[in-house]
Image (spheres, rainbow, N blue to C red):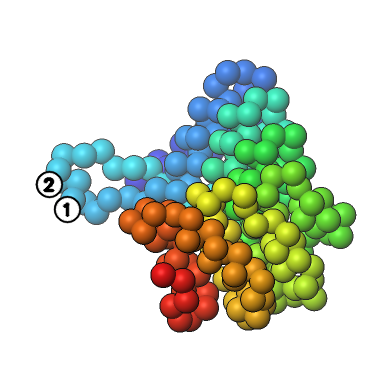
């Protein structure tokens, strides 16, 4: 079974390399990503349910390089497929990072956000000065959140917090997510009475049974390690 998966992966990789500018390239990248990411079901489970086993093979340098070579494809959904494939846990950071870093500079915000999300914390912390500045000033705030949230344990900690502090979302629906990115800056947030007061005032504008209100309160209480807003 494993041998079959390895053969399929090699064949898909070869087909992908020959499919540049052809409609099937997205499909082939998605197939490769599934082979990288799915484990075999047990033989007993397969016999009981009569299902077909999912092929799984560890990523090879050749297959990773083939997928990564489409990081600048003209079609948005091909680039999305590249990110989805490269963010598989089985893909080593050392082999996925170059393409994902390249995609941080993509013209489309969906690609930049998902590239920032897919990068490991270590990769975010190791961005070059120019790339770090670009990410921390990105026009899409979630790109800034992902990068800034990873800098708390680095020499760029103050810069990371300043970026997050200046990127409080105007929409209450995104406030809980922003607070989650602040988790590494718990002490800085707790010491910022002005910011906490602002968040509490926004909580008070929401109905008590509102899901968004409960979510924000939960995140804030976890950060402050004690209930403040009600």
Specify whether 187 is left or right of 55. Answer: right
Which dot marks residue 158?
none
SS class of the residue under badge 2? helix
Nearest the viewer among 58 and 186 is 186
Q: Quadrant of residue 110?
A: top right
Residue 39 in sight here: yes
Q: Position of residue 180 (x, y in %)?
A: 54, 64
**Residue drawn 75% across and 34% down?**
107
- Residue at 32% across, 50% down: 40
Q: Residue at x 53, y 66 (%)?
A: 200
Residue 8 location in percent, x, y?
Answer: 46, 36
Q: Residue furthest right?
A: 130
Say whether marks 2 and 1 touch (CB < 8 Å). Answer: yes
Few, some or many C-alpha atoms within 10 Å of disc 1 (few <14, some 14-19, many ≥20)? few
Helix, strand or loop status at disc 1: helix
Residue 62 placement (x, y as % from top left): 63, 44
Q: Residue furthest top?
A: 22
User: Along the line of sight, which residue is nearer the eye, 111 or 224?
Assistant: 224
Identify the residue position indicated by label 2 in the image: 48
Q: In the figure, 184 relative to 60: above or below?
A: below
Q: Does residue 200 appear left or right of residue 96 in this picture?
A: left
C-alpha distance separating marks 2 and 1: 6 Å
Query: What residue does disc 1 label?
Result: 44
The residue depicted at 74 percent of the width and 44 percent of the height is 139
The C terminus, quarter of image = bottom left
Neighbour tally class for label 2: few under 14, some 14-19, many 20 plus, Cα within 10 Å:
few
């Amino acid at each position: 079974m494993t041998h079959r998966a390895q053969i399929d992966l090699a064949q898909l990789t070869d087909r992908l390399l020959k499919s540049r500018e052809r409609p099937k390239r997205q499909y082939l990248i998605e197939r490769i990503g599934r082979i990288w990411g799915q484990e075999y079901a047990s033989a007993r489970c397969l016999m009981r349910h009569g299902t077909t086993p999912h092929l799984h093979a560890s990523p090879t340098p050749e297959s990773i390089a083939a997928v990564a070579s489409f990081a600048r494809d003209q079609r948005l959904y091909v680039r999305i497929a590249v990110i989805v494939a490269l963010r598989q846990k089985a893909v080593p950071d050392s082999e996925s990072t170059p393409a994902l870093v390249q995609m941080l500079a993509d013209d489309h915000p969906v690609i930049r956000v998902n590239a920032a999300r897919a990068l490991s914390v270590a990769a975010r912390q190791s961005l070059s000065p120019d790339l770090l500045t670009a990410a921390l000033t990105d026009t899409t705030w979630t790109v800034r959140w992902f990068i800034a949230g990873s800098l708390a344990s680095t020499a760029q900690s103050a810069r990371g917090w300043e970026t997050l502090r200046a990127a409080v979302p105007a929409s209450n629906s995104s406030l809980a997510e922003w607070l989650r990115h602040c988790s590494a800056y718990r002490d800085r947030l707790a010491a910022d009475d002005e910011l906490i007061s602002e968040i509490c005032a926004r909580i008070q504008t929401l109905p008590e049974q509102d899901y968004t209100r409960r979510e924000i309160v939960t995140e804030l209480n976890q950060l402050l390690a004690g209930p403040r807003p009600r």
